[in-house]
Image (tube, rainbow, N blue to C red):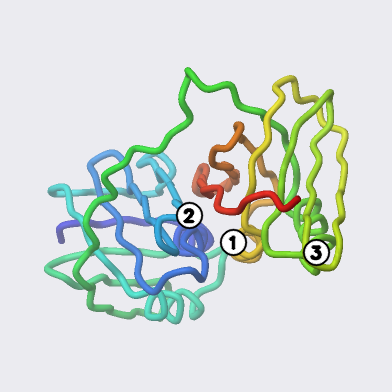
Amino acid sequence: MMFESKASVKAWKALIGSVVNLQDELSFDIKPDMILSKNTMVGNVVLSFCQWKKEMFEEYKVEEEIRIGIRMDGIRDILKRFIDKDTLEVNYDNGIMYFKSGRKSFEMRCVSPSEPYPKDIVLKDEIQYAVFDTTNEELKDIMEDLTFLGEGCYIKSHEGKVIFSVIGDSGKGAVELDKPVSVVAETTMSIEFVNEILASLGKFSDSIRCHFFTNGYLMLRFFVKELGQIDYFIAPRIERKD
């Protein structure tokens, strides 16, 4: 086998959930020290980034670095057959992925992987970010309160507060949170994409750290016990209405 591993079913579900419902295929790199998943969605508006390190597996063996592609509907259907707390053996060899736990085993043909994403989007030391912690439930409630007004949401940090607001054709609304932020910043985000991300990863992680800077991307960092962290970079794409 070119790749052999053992890890929890829940961790694999979290990795597959990292691309949410915004694309049909997932590409990732199996490296000697980690599985690296970096995928763009909906015209490069959303980038998901996950490093699943070797130390977090029960077993991990790689003969050589591999880049593979899988269909989301196929692997989702397979993972549904296993219980989250179970240990799952996942192996790969010559274009086939093998899944086994207990009495159940499945094989899935891989597809051609996408080209590696050329841009290395990371948090940069030279940028001052507004940073605050929240939960899946808190952020979901805010999106539900504002979504009827429009699809784009403004997020602003100011004097120890974070303010979410929407300006739509029928009116405007805002939700204000007390957060210990020291950097003043303002940007925009898509409510639809945030809702998709929250729905996909909510059952795996409730702890979220948000980073944003003026007129720049919003980063949502989810902490997943069995996997590590999954980052989403959401590009701004709307303009303020007068």
Q: Label 1 neighbourhood size at 10 Å, few (<14), some (14-19), many (20+)?
A: many
Residue contact at pointers 3 and 1, CB within 8 angstroms: no
> Residue 70: percent from the left, percent from the top?
30, 70
Is residue 202 visible from the viewing direction of this image?
no
Residue carrying label 3 = 144
Determine whether 47 is above or below 183 in the image. below
Determine whether 78 is above or below 127 in the image. below
- At x 76%, y 59%, the residue is 143
Tag 3: amino acid: Glu
Q: Nearer the viewer, residue 52 or 18?
A: 18
Q: Label 2 neighbourhood size at 10 Å, few (<14), some (14-19), many (20+)?
A: many
Q: Label 3 neighbourhood size at 10 Å, few (<14), some (14-19), many (20+)?
A: few
- At x 30%, y 56%, the residue is 28
Marks 3 and 1, how far apart at CA: 13 Å
Mark closer to the chain start, 3 or 2: 2
Image mark count? 3
Residue contact at pointers 2 and 1, CB within 8 angstroms: yes
Q: Residue furthest front?
A: 242
Residue carrying label 1 = 193
Residue contact at pointers 3 and 2, CB within 8 angstroms: no
Q: Quadrant of residue 2?
A: bottom left
Looking at the rendered image, the quarter that the N terminus falls into is bottom left
Marks 3 and 2, how far apart at CA: 20 Å
Marks 2 and 1, how far apart at CA: 8 Å
Q: Secondary structure at mark 3?
A: helix
> Residue 97: percent from the left, percent from the top?
26, 70
- At x 87%, y 55%, the residue is 173
Mark closer to the chain start, 2 or 1: 2
Q: Secondary structure at mark 2?
A: strand
Tag 2: amino acid: Val
